[in-house]
Image: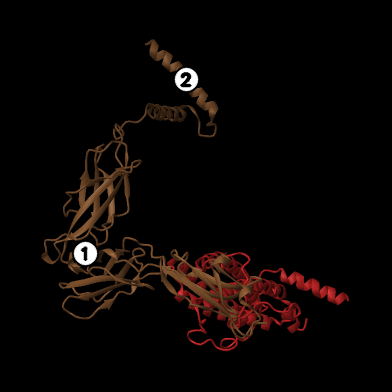
Chain colours: A red, B brown
Amino acid sequence: GDSWGIFTFLCAALCNLPALPALNCSEELGAGQSIQQTYDLTRYLEHQLRTLAGTYLNYLGPPFNEPDFNPPRLARAERVPSATVDLDLWRGLTDNARLAANYRAYSRLLCYLRVLDGQVGTAELRHRLAHFCASLQGLVLSIGGVMSSLGYPLPTGPAGPPAPPGAPTAPNDFLKKMDDFWLLKELQTWLWRSAKDFNRLKKKVPPAVVTLRLEARGF
Amino acid sequence: VSPAADPAVISPQDPTLLIGSSLVATCTVSPDFPLKAEDLYWTLNGRRLPAASYSALGPSTLSVALARLNGSRQQSGDNLVCHSRDGGILAGSCLYVGLPPEKPVNITCWSKNMKDLTCKWAPGTEGETFLHTNYTLKYKRRWYGQDNTCQEYHTAGTYSCHIPKDLALFTPYEIWVEASNRLGVAVSDVVMLDILDVVTTDPPSDVHVSRVGDLEDQLSVRWSSPPALKDFLFQAKYQIQYRVEDSSEWKVVDDVGNQTSCRLAGLRPGTVYFVQVRCNPFSIYGSKKAGIWSDWSNPTAASTPRSGECRQQRPPQNTTLRRELKQFFGWVKKHAYGCSNLGIKLYDQWRVWLQKSHKTRNQV
């Protein structure tokens, strides 16, 4: 009872100290910073995506750019990893699994976006897409950085069946437009979900985590 | 539950059509689906097509007739969609309606310091083809068969291309642009040129504008020749343009020749001027032809002296103050003992003494 109180107080006090060279905190400190940065990056990408999606859907033309547009998701569209997951399942994810899901999803989404970049018509769209891909690449690297600093291995290879070099291209132009629509939708959903994922991770890995180290020293 | 097969098939799928043409499209529901022709409807770019244009060609096949089509609303194709009664999408087809491209025109090229070649052109007179049009710039040395394709596009605007290397001098090149879209190809006229005829260079660097002593109506402009001049056997001639700060009208000085300095005269006194210089390489390898003018240098500003400004005249107050202070300190030395009681009281005492001595002086 009392000793725990003292212990918690000591931790709180120590957490507020600026620099503790004797304790090897740099790794946890790094992870805390990286998680915040990754969170910020997802918010920034979410903002960028709004403009990109608006422009792209206008390029596809109505009904794709109509606000209530909701086409059927055909079998072929499921190659894009889905962000929606059962709530309890989501809550129960380990940090490693949570991070890995994000890492795999964005790596895959980046591949598909790059293919899009090569096919799209107008110069303005190509420019926006290229910019977005660069930022998305940054997000993938950032997530990788968080995983490394927490000691988790990076997921190897693409998740699920590897996408063939040309990517399973839709058999006709209209179906391709639908695929593009769903790609952008999934990207949006993933960015919303990632913000929640990283918020959750932020709470579990605060900026100056010292507790673990104190325990190790037989405190 | 996502279906294994497509719910319906549209024919024709993704056709390309000339503006003004008509089209009859059919939507055939897959046998796995319990839909009949009367359960279907069509939309084009999100707008429902009138039922009067529909026709049932079979129990599960509905057709629609489209007449005198306009150019596609977006370059990705018009969206013709077959729906089930509840609005669900069964199938779609992208219609590409437009015109074949026109011959690209006005091809102009220039070479920066004889090292590369940039060309720009304009699309044919109509311009809008409603279809995505690809432009390819091609070039070959006259009398040497091989066609080359330019790779770096949009370097100097949308319709431009840059050839960075492997260009031969003293040999004519044939250059042309091919425009192609889904409806056809158009080739521009061939332009023949020698790299040496279209050479331009960087603008002059280190442009300095300064006053000419006290002269109110003149400014002196000095600059350095562009660095590439040293490497190539060409001369340079220059042009200067200048304007008053709050005007947009430039005055051009044309006869600068190949000097790297010039004096501007007949200017307004006390005015700020903006000056720019540009360069034209000519007599390249001895040819008499002029090159292409460079861009103007960044504007440099300077002002002409104002009338009377430069005379060595100090305003009256300054001189009196100095004299007074000199006198005061001289008096302090004589009448005050050290600087400890230096203060306003002492100054007042001095003023009193000054007045007294003034009176005596005037009395004399």
Residue B19, image x and y in percent? 41, 66
Name the kind of residue labelled 2 in the image: Trp
- Quarter of the picture containing the N terminus of chain B is bottom right
Quarter of the figure with the C terminus of chain B: top left
Who comes first in sequence, dot 2 or dot 1? 1
The residue that mark 2 highlights is B353
Residue B258 horizontal/vertical position (percent): 16, 55
| Badge 2 density bin: few <14, some 14–19, many ≥20, Cα 10 Å | few
Residue drawn at x 42%, y 73% is B16
The verdict on a common chain for dots 2 and 1 is yes
* Mark count: 2
Specify the quadrant of the image occupied by residue B143: bottom left
Quarter-of-image position of residue A68: bottom right
Question: Which x, y percent locates residue B29?
Answer: 59, 80
Residue B68 visible in rendering: yes
Could you give the CA–CA distance between mark 2 and mark 1, rounded to whole angstroms?
A: 83 Å
Residue B305 placement, left or right of B232: right
* Mark 1 belongs to chain: B
- Horizontal placement of A162 versus B301: left or right? right
Residue highlighted by disc 1: B199
What percent of the width, then of the height, locates residue A22?
A: 67, 78
Say which chain tag 2 marks.
Answer: B
Which residue is outermost to the top? B363
**Looking at the image, can residue A48 be seen?**
no
In screen coordinates, is A96 left or right of B338?
right
